Amino acid sequence: MDEGLIGDWFDAYSDDVYRFLVYYTARTDVEDLLQDVFIRAIDGYDSFKGEASPKTWLISIARNIAIDEARKRKRKDWRKLIGLYETRSEISPEERHLSNEQQVILHRAITQLKRDYRDVVIFRGIEELSVAETAAVLNWSESKVRVTFHRALKTLKSRLKGVYHDEE
């Protein structure tokens, strides 16, 4: 196992994994989860076959850790987790980024999507993974990724249409 390689991956992909965890968990305090991702990567390095990119593999690990964390906390209502942004007194860089009203509205709309839609919107729309990478992370066919992404965007646009038309 090459710990130097994992260190290089941390330097290259930690921001992407961090951003994914923030969006996926709807929390800004994900540093412990980020650390868990790279610990699990070190422990599971032998299982990395190189069929996917390191970024895809790390985000796949991050997704599993986030799901485990959500189960552990037994919080299934993601809207409640959004409240954590509003209750913190210190402002992190991620919170500053989310302070833009339209981004907050969009973020809330994404967190309210059903899990499959939320996953594919985060991977394709926010993390900008390819269809193939998204399919690898979610263990779906590429066709399912395309169809689900299309349906998720349609649902998201429908939910946001009323919000943005009300402002005009």
Image (tube, helix red, strand yellow):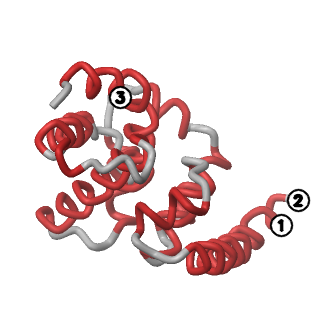
- Label 1 secondary element: helix
- Give the CA distance from mark 3 to mark 1: 43 Å
- Label 2 secondary element: loop
Is residue 60 rendered to the left or right of residue 45?
right
* Residue 155: x %, y % from top left: 66, 78
Crowd around label 3: few <14 · some 14–19 · many ≥20 (10 Å): some
Identify the residue position indicated by label 1 in the image: 165
Q: Residue furthest right?
A: 168
- Give the CA distance from mark 2 to mark 1: 5 Å
Q: Amino acid at mark 3?
A: Trp
* Residue 20: x %, y % from top left: 43, 47
Q: Earlier in the sequence, mark 3 or mark 1?
A: 3
Q: Are marks 2 and 1 in contact (CB under 8 Å)?
A: yes
* Residue 56: x %, y % from top left: 43, 49
* Residue 39: x %, y % from top left: 15, 37
- For the point 24% across and 19% down, which residue is it? 4
Count of numbered circles in the view: 3
Crowd around label 1: few <14 · some 14–19 · many ≥20 (10 Å): few
Identify the residue position indicated by label 3 in the image: 9
Q: Amino acid at mark 2?
A: Glu
Identify the residue position indicated by label 2 in the image: 168
